[in-house]
Image: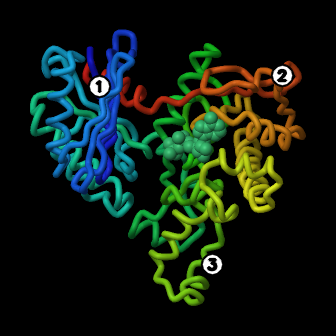
Amino acid sequence: MKIMSINAGSSSLKFSLFDMTNEEVLASGLFERIGIEGSCYTIKYNGEKLKQEIELPDHSVAVSILLEKLVELGIIASLEEIDGVGHRVVSGGDLYKESVLINDKVIQDLIDLKDYAPLHNPAHVLGINAFKEVLPNTPMIAVFDTAFHQTMDEVSYLYPVPYSWYQDYKVRKYGAHGTSHRYIASTIEKELGRKDLRIISCHLGNGGSITAIKDGKSVDTSMGFTPLAGIMMGTRSGDIDASIIPFIMEKEGKNASEVIDDLNKKSGFLGLSQLSSDSRDIEKGVLEGNKNCILAEQKYIRTVVNYIANYYVLLGGCDVLVFTAGIGENSSSTRLKIVEKLACLGFDLDVEANQVRGELRKISSKNSKSLIYVVPTDEELMIARDTLEIINR
Ligand code: ADP
């Protein structure tokens, strides 16, 4: 079975093609600047990389070229070999608790949910429609970032604001990175051979979120109504006092969306360091003694540790603490600094084992009360697995 995993943005389309007999990636790549001058695509396959500049007026053209190239490069013999296409979808609101087969109603729901992911959901629909044109008989599945967190109870997902905001407009916590946290939970379950686990999953990338997982279900998560909430991130503030927004609007003569833009794009590592949103630059700055970088890193660690401690209590303890995504998988120093602050809860690293990048490994010491793991996340594979499972049903 060959399954395509798709992540369509407003001007981009990322894909991975899997052979699901062994979950091997046959090809992957990116179509960029769709509808913008200077568009191009990259396809990686068989250890080779093809990059080409080409006009991509819309998503349909990108999808046609992608499928043509897969055949032309001999990656597949014909389009009939693609058994299903899984689409990443940012918001399923509170309508979708798991992945679904896409039909006209699902597409309409994605359009109706656009207020909850204005940049993403309309772009996903473009991607879905583009595939529908070229592969009208191939089943397509939607895999939602929010779905995994639909198991949160109302104490976790409600905000202490007028209840009518929830009743009238569905203002609540939806969370994000659900596909990644679900992948982490299932990988750890497999690794330890049991499901009755309290897992704290730390997805620390450019965007970041932490999820409390009990018996395979999300109990609470740090992102909120949108991905702006929770821990500090590359360019996002994470949790702040909402009163700052009107205050800055008045001081800087900005409207609300401009201030939200500052909180999404000019805050976090970038805001505090005044240097970079990339944790590698921050780490370098710390080594050079740059004060702003030191402050940015300390604040980052503090917000991450606060959420872990919070979820430790919520779960009544922690069996496994997991680090994943760009920073979580690669930065041994960030992991060390986080776990050091958690010593009072009995977390302890094996400093040697912690010298690992991007591979599944236990990094806790024998003395640690909880296991600590690095697990490389794989949202594309999770999407492909869901797609295969739904097709087989
Ligand atoms: P996203 O998917 O949210 O865009 P990623 O999961 O790719 O982000 O994570 C990006 C972050 O991971 C950046 O801050 C980057 O500095 C960090 N990162 C990536 N590789 C490394 C590395 N080898 N060492 C330290 N940090 C890394």
Q: How many marks?
A: 3
Question: Is residue 367 shown left or right of residue 106?
Answer: right
**x then y, percent, for residue 141:** 27, 34
State which image quarter holds ligand 1. top right
Kindly identify which residue carries mark 1: 390
Kindly identify which residue carries mark 2: 365
Q: Amino acid at mark 3?
A: Ile
**x then y, percent, for residue 317:** 76, 35
- In contact (CB < 8 Å): disc 3 and disc 2: no
Q: Residue at x 61, y 16 (%)?
A: 191
Q: Amino acid at mark 2?
A: Ser
Quarter of image, res 252: bottom right
Quarter of image, res 376: top right
Depth check: 63 or 215 in front?
Answer: 63
Mark 1 Cβ inside 8 Å of ligand 1:
no
Q: Residue at x 20, y 43 (%)?
A: 54
Q: Residues within 10 Å of mark 1 (few under 14, many from 20)?
A: some
Kindly identify which residue carries mark 3: 244
Q: Residue at x 23, y 44 (%)?
A: 127
Depth check, mark 1 against mark 3: the one in front is 3
